[in-house]
Amino acid sequence: MKARVHITLKRGVLDPQGKTIARALGSLGFAGINEVRQGKTVEIDLAETDAAAAHSTVAAMCAKLLANPVIEDYRIDLAEG
Amino acid sequence: MRITPEIVADHGLSADEFARILHLLDRAPNLTELGLFSAMWSEHCSYKSSRVWLRELPTEAPWVICGPGENAGVIDIGDGQAVVFKMESHNHPSFIEPYQGAATGVGGILRDVFTMGARPIAILNALRFGDPAHPKTRHLVAGVVAGIGGYGNCVGVPTVGGECTFHTSYDGNILVNAMTVGIARTDRIFYARAGGVGNPVVYVGSKTGRDGIHGATMASAEFDQRSEERRPTVQVGDPFTEKLLLEACLELMESDAIVGIQDLGAAGLTSSSAEMAARGGAGIELDLDQVPLRERGMSPYEIMLSESQERMLMVIRPGREADARRVFEKWELDFAVIGRVTDSGHLVLRHAGAVVADVPVAALVEEAPRYQRPWVPSPPQAAPEIAAPADMAAALRALVGSPDLSSRRWIWEQYDHMVMADTVQHPGGDAAVVRVHGTGKALAIATDCTPRYCAADPERGGAQAVAECWRNLTAVGARPLAITDCMNFGNPERPEVMGQFAGCIRGMAAACRALDFPVVSGNVSLYNETSGKGVQPTPAIGGVGLLDDLRHVTTLALKHPGDALALIGATAGHLPCSAFARTIAGTEAGPPPPVDLAAERRNGDFVRREIHDHGVAACHDLADGGLAVALAEMAMAGSLGATITATPGALPLHAWLFGEDQGRYLIEVPAGRAQGLLARAAMAGVPAILLGRVESLDSLTLPGGCSISVAALRTAHEAWLPAYMGEG
């Protein structure tokens, strides 16, 4: 299975990178930007074929390494193949 | 909303304290007001358990411009220049989220210094982690070190030194103490005082979000349906904004626009507004609708208690709003007039057209509880027998490669310690030395504490921490001037812990007096305790000294084969409580070495005079691991060997080599000058012996003919930390 993990800062946590992007967009002339929040995507190709098992493995990866559960949330999308 | 006993308890206030609030207000507080009291009467803001003891510390000297009670201490270094410095803890946040906790700790202490008008020139960190074998330790070390480097490196202030040790008492409560040193003009020091009725109160910096809001909001039932969006969050630092804030503040400080200024640290707007009003004997009225917010729908409670980073509160002169705004907008920072100074003596908050809080400033600050907590002195420790090791050379190698004494290179190489181009002595020496930019003067800076000494005998340990800091500054040739202290202890409601606190303070006070080394700033962190297990008492001392002439800077590296080595100070071979006892003999029991403050002063003043009047090639103070470890460190730093020709006399060899008697220094001088040095020492009443000589060979030869290669020592010394962190 292929897993795509989206990791973002929790709501309410300051996002200095997002703030910088917003400022840069403003200086490039993109008007009307209220806020930018950014995150990262991790793609993992797994030998596992069972979706539930794959999900729980990837969730463990998130808790242990990919995300910082104190300040970040993550979402896991799974696809066949 | 009615204030129930549960809500009061959630705010960390006792029933007695709540009764005192009812009495002071003559009515029940609303939730916002309760939040104000909760923050201002917390241990962190009120020093309610520690204040009665802190009074015992000496805080004055002719060179002290401003002692404790302001954002940082200020001392005079001549030529119209002042040094502004302080150390502060960020222990709990760093345990929860090590990177951001440590980073925002650095950010907070930087603001404490530049809010007083100083440009920060150096950062140091005193770190205590749990047992290396504890499953969380490695992760915490990695995060804290990265966080300190990440913030300090981005702001562009060098991280020049500090300390890092490991002990199982910190398994559940690491200590992250950050110190910043800055330089200001003596005629441009800014204080955190509100003054001038009608003067505008100005908010600058970043916007306010729901960062680090008191956990009580999460616990109260009313917020359940919206708990997700109201969840208190970890503070995230933004060092680039801090840099802008630093430059903007210093730019505005060039004018006469600012009346008073304070950074927004713990308890955010609450403590900064209340403390500024209290110091100025004024009132403050704030319109919370004017506060720049990052999130929608923030309540007055949240706005007042948010700990969002990189913010400042200022009182400026009337009519100067436009000038000030221009400066902050140039640096792309928020600027808002959010209130004014009043003569009411009250902190009044308005939100959405209504008064949401109205509390006498005195009730929040001066009337905060003060406790004379019960305490019991720590019991004296019986000295155990410490057996000799089978092999002295192997013991020395094990010591220099042990977690506490191994090289910290892995840590300080992650820090930019050279930025600003004024770092004269990089990390790894007795004290960091940083040039005062554009002059021939330099500051020596060191942090010190030996918690195992403080645990065994708090009074002796407290005195030793101050004395060792003074000795480290002396060893690089500096005249020690003043200290900041960061008092990290367990639960003060336990009489044993309060006894440790009282003991440490008494020892520190005695040492400060004897060494003319006053306390000018500090911070108290209590409740460093998990499941009834407190940290070792850790009064971290950050000291600053002055070198009038950079040419006198002395390092610990051995320099010239053939030079003589002299040992200054008396050796009694005190082994209990030593690094040797802990690492080699496996016991932490026993009393720490006695601290003779008069001898400490005499020996240190002698060494400093030798450095200044006669010049010494190398100098190192003796601390953990005693004579043998000090000599090994000098040999490793200089890539030279040495032979000890002196003999231990009546002492067992291992006690002579590894005992941790205080007030001692190892110095290297040209062979022809050794006798003169010994003669001058005798005249000054300072014990001194000729210890041996520097060798070109790569080996240390100990009494009895046993020798060890310096390269082997270095391998052991450099190996432990990178290997532990998985990079060896």
Image: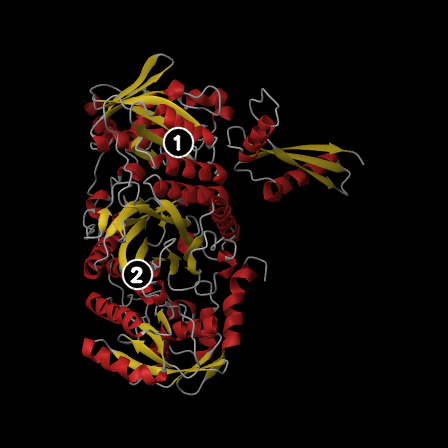
Q: Chain of mark 1?
A: B
In the rendered image, the quadrant that contains the N terminus of chain B is top left
Residue holding disc 1? B214
Work out whether residue B491 can be spotted: no
Q: Identify residue type, mark 1.
A: His
Q: Is residue A79 above or below residue B399?
A: above
Q: Is residue B399 above or below residue B12?
A: below
Q: Is residue B129 above or below residue B475?
A: above
Q: Position of residue B324 (x, y in %)?
A: 37, 28
Asked where in the image residue B189 lies, by quadrant, the reply is top left
Q: Chain of mark 2?
A: B
Q: Secondary structure at mark 1?
A: loop
Q: Identify residue type, mark 2.
A: Asp
Q: Earlier in the sequence, mark 1 or mark 2?
A: 1
In the rendered image, the quadrant that contains the C terminus of chain B is bottom right
Residue displayed at 35% across by 41% down: B112
**What count of labels does the image hold?**
2
Q: Left or right: where does residue B396 sit relative to residue B5?
A: right
